[in-house]
Image (tube, grey):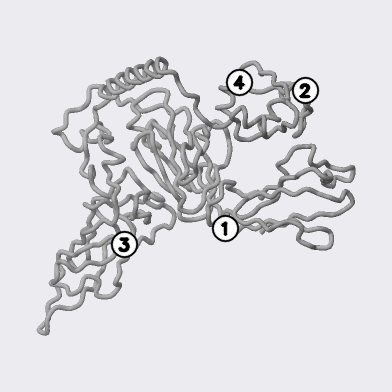
Amino acid sequence: MAEPIPYKVKSGENMMDIAKKLGLKDWHQLKEYHDSVSDQKTSEMPFAGSTLMTPSQEEVYEMNGEEPPLDPVEEQKKATQKQEEEKKKEEEEKKQEELSKGEHDGKYFVVHGAKCVCDKAVNPRQTADLQVTSHKSIVLNDQSKKYLATEDDKTFLPPAATFGQCKLQPTTGGYLPCSFVPTPKWDKTYESTQVLGKKTLTEISELKCMIGGNITINKHGQTDSVSNAHADNTDPLELAAVNPSIEMPKKKVEYPIVTSIAITEVEDREKFQEKDSKIKEVIFLRKDEEASFRANLKSGNKQLTSWMVYTDHKGDKENRLLVREQIGTEFSQSFGEFGKYRIEGYGKPKKPDFENGKYDKCDASCSIDIEVVENKLQDLGITSYEYSSRIDPLKKLKFRKGVPTRIRAEFFIQKLTEDEKGRLTMHVEDGAGNNISNAKTGTSSITFTPKNSNATYTVKAK
């Protein structure tokens, strides 16, 4: 921390004027800074001739949430250093490239509403819409924002004569309508991504009909392919076991060691502050609000980083909702239902048959807890300083006459959407119930100045 810079207050200046001179966006931070480094506290209206301790220019940038500009020489030096680091990183990754592509590589995931066809339909172009009924939680994070289909999803629309007429059921009067009877599960499913323990579907998945037809995907319904997440991430040992033509790798698979994970971004939240799993804090999200995560590694092949989503804040096995195996250190997800979730990043497989199930459990240090909520008004709080209010001996809040007081509406998620702002109204009433302030809409705080030390005031928000 740099040494404070003394500033002599001029006549007529207030804290806001001085903060503006320094380039500081919030004058409250200037007062906080002075009070933290000086034995002599200051007020909103400091005396002319008094000395105010001010932050350095670097600290002003930090308080504003801005990056200080680099001088050209230093900027070039950092750019060169970054290029060298990236080059070394690429070389190391190439050394780890011992993985081969599987049959699902480059194939698209299937979502709710996908168009399917039957090879035994009289009209081969007759389609039916696949309905995702196995869960209502995991939304695929692409433009479609639809539920991810699993091997248990076998419901189609229309329910009757699903694929029109069936060539396998001829009569003298023509072909009978399709009487679709599916087998228990889809074939050619994708094991590395699972929802509630169920394998997911890609565009090559197939479903057999007991009558004899073969159901395939005509239009998968979205834009996110397996290659976007899983290209080159197939375990070479497993691949060699099923395909003798693949040469067994000579080097041991270097599973990553995950030291922690971080939530790096939340959809439409500007200046979201990254939070690490080492700091235990529940992150609140809205329904269908996408959050992005990053795994921090000590060593190992980052491409083999996997992710798990639980429907609790404990990480119990029976509450495993989503598995995304070996997709890399970046992961994003949104949720279609309210509730508690836990996001975990891990390296070694969570399977009972891998090293006797040693890693088949949740690591809380590499997990972040999420709660999907309706962002309702929770409380009202005083955000102005101690000179604007106090607590009397009866534990009641007392406002100071003639001193502006700022009150903020408290929400689960303090950064409100435009819709939430539009629904929020705040005003102040006197003891007789008269509105003594202009009702404020579109803001989460209100400021008023008490004019009577013996009056009772009520702040209302809805």
Nearer to us in this view, 123 or 234: 123
Q: Earlier in the sequence, mark 2 or mark 4?
A: 2
Judge from the rendering whether residue 140 lies leftward or rightward of residue 129; answer left or right: right
Which mark lies nearer to you, 4 or 3? 4
The mark closer to the camera, 1 or 2, is 2
The residue that disc 1 covers is: 422
Mark 4 residue crowding within 10 angstroms, few (<14) / some (14–19) / many (20+): some
Closer mark to the observer between disc 1 and disc 4: 4
Q: As shown in the figure, which amino acid type bears the numbered disc 4? A: Ser
Whole-angstrom CA distance, mark 1 to mark 4, is 39 Å
Residue 11 quadrant: top right
**Marks 1 and 3 in Cβ contact (< 8 Å):** no
Q: Measuring 66% from the left and 52% from the top, which residue is drawn there?
A: 378
**Looking at the image, do the residues carrying marks 2 and 3 touch, with CB atoms under 8 Å apart?**
no
| Residue wearing tag 4 | 56
Crowd tier of the residue under label 1, counting other residues whose Cα lies within 10 Å: few below 14, some 14–19, many 20 or above: few
Residue 281 to residue 136: above or below = above
**x then y, percent, for residue 270:** 49, 41
**Residue 201 location in percent, x, y?**
29, 52
Q: At numbered mark 4, what does the secondary structure look like: helix, strand or loop?
A: loop
